[in-house]
Image: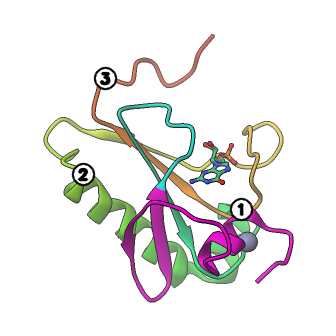
Amino acid sequence: MEIDCLFCRIVAGQIPATVVRETDTTLAFRDINPQAAVHVLVIPKEHYADVATLTQADPALAGDVLGTAAVVAETEGLLADGFRLIFNTGQFGGQEVFHAHAHVLGGEPLGPMRAR
Ligand code: 5GP
Ligand code: ZN
């Protein structure tokens, strides 16, 4: 655990979150500032700064994150109409929390992939 990491503190139970799914290696919880009708974050419990670092260090754990994201998409009722899975990464990617996380977005049409 990284002492100053917000998502590590959520994993440790030090900051409350609305958890929708937990596995041995991953945690899924609702985004505090949802950008769509459904907006869930999926993280590895172990700290990695971003998805690239995570995948290079532990590809199986990265697979666990994808697997939990897919189950969340199903349990949130997103499979029929579709959804979007986003890993913002680094400065240009707009990443704000440097603990790897997937955004699962859906429940309404999400529009173009990029605002221009
Ligand atoms: P990023 O911009 O790093 O890809 O996404 C970080 C996300 O974390 C944002 O969508 C933001 O709303 C969310 N977030 C920030 N602080 C908290 C928090 O304390 N709890 C929860 N559940 N989400 C948070
Ligand atoms: Zn962390």
Say which quadrant the C terminus sits in. top right
- Which is closer to the viewer, label 3 or label 2? 2
Q: Residue at x 22, y 44 (%)?
A: 78
Q: Which residue is mark 1?
A: 50
Q: Residue 76's mark?
A: 2
Amino acid type of disc 2? Glu
Q: Position of residue 91 (x, y in %)?
A: 83, 41
- Say whether residue 104 is left or right of residue 83: right
Pointer 1: residues within 10 angstroms few (<14), some, or many (20+)?
some
User: Circles 1 and 3: CB distance less than 8 Å?
Assistant: no
Amino acid type of disc 1? Asp
Dividing the picture into quadrants, the one containing residue 6 is bottom right
> How much space separates mark 3 and mark 2, taking CA atoms?
15 Å
Amino acid type of disc 3? Pro
**First in sequence: mark 3 vs mark 2:** 2
Element class at badge 2: loop
Q: Residue 109's mark?
A: 3
Element class at badge 3: loop
Relative to residue 103, is residue 18 depicted above or below? below
Relative to residue 67, is residue 46 depicted above or below? below
Question: Magenta stretch?
Answer: 1-29
Q: Position of residue 115 (x, y in %)?
A: 59, 15
Q: Position of residue 57 (x, y in %)?
A: 69, 81
